[in-house]
Amino acid sequence: DSVRAEGARSGSARDHRMHFHVRGLLLALRGRASDACDAFHRSLYTASAAYIRANLALGRSCIAAQRSADAIGPLRGVLRGPTGAAGTYGTHTEAHELIARAFDALGQRDSARVHYARVAAAWSVADEPWRARADSARVRLAALGGAPRPSPAIAGLTRALASRRF
């Protein structure tokens, strides 16, 4: 309640909705994933993921509540959102990991494969625990049929970059 009262005094739309984020954190800790998903959704004040932590928390909660379809839009917002300021509170790879899990839960194998492949590539040489998360993505990717083939244009660009002929 104090977060709601303080937020109401602020001139920032984000602060007016911050109490929903705090409520979502409490609900998630209590194992009430569906209610947490709703609270995190209400905490969003822009579609562009100006505060990435809210979108990532929403994604985790909605996936845990078996409401993966509700997670995809806000997680895509992370990928379209800022990379500086509040955009540094999470990473695009975290968003790709959650989007992969959401698509996987929905049975959308091709989309899941694209995002799992990004996670596996991004964290394959990272420190623990991220490398373990890359390994998990690689295992799931293999179960779904492996990494998707790049388009001919991307494959050509990759070859050109590798040979440094451009």
Image: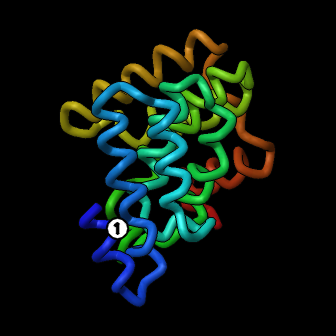
Report the residue that reaches farthest toward the left: 128
**Residue 90 placement, left or right of 142:** left
Q: Which element type, helix, strand or loop, lies under badge 1?
A: helix
Residue placed most toward the observer, 166 or 101: 101
Colour setting: rainbow
Give the number of marks: 1
**Relative to residue 110, is residue 39 depicted above or below?**
below
Residue placed most toward the observer, 36 or 97: 36
Residue 3, percent across and down?
Answer: 28, 66
Which quadrant would the C terminus be assigned to in this image? bottom right
Query: At 32% from the left edge and 61% from the top edge, which residue is drawn?
Result: 89
Report the residue that reaches farthest toward the top: 143
Looking at the rendering, which quadrant does residue 120 occupy? top left
Which quadrant would the N terminus be assigned to in this image? bottom left
Residue placed most toward the observer, 159 or 28: 28
Query: At 54% from the left edge and 56% from the top edge, which residue is drawn?
Result: 42
Q: Which residue is mark 1?
A: 4
Residue placed most toward the observer, 127 or 70: 70
**Residue 135 placement, left or right of 62:** left
For the question of whether residue 17 can be seen, the reply is yes
For the question of whether residue 116 can be seen, the reply is no
Q: Residues within 10 Å of mark 1 (few under 14, many from 20)?
A: some
Query: At 68% from the left edge and 55% from the top edge, which residue is drawn?
Result: 157
Looking at the rendering, which quadrant does residue 131 occupy? top left
The amino acid type of the residue labelled 1 equals Arg
Residue 29, percent across and down?
Answer: 28, 33
**Relative to residue 3, is residue 27 depicted above or below?**
above
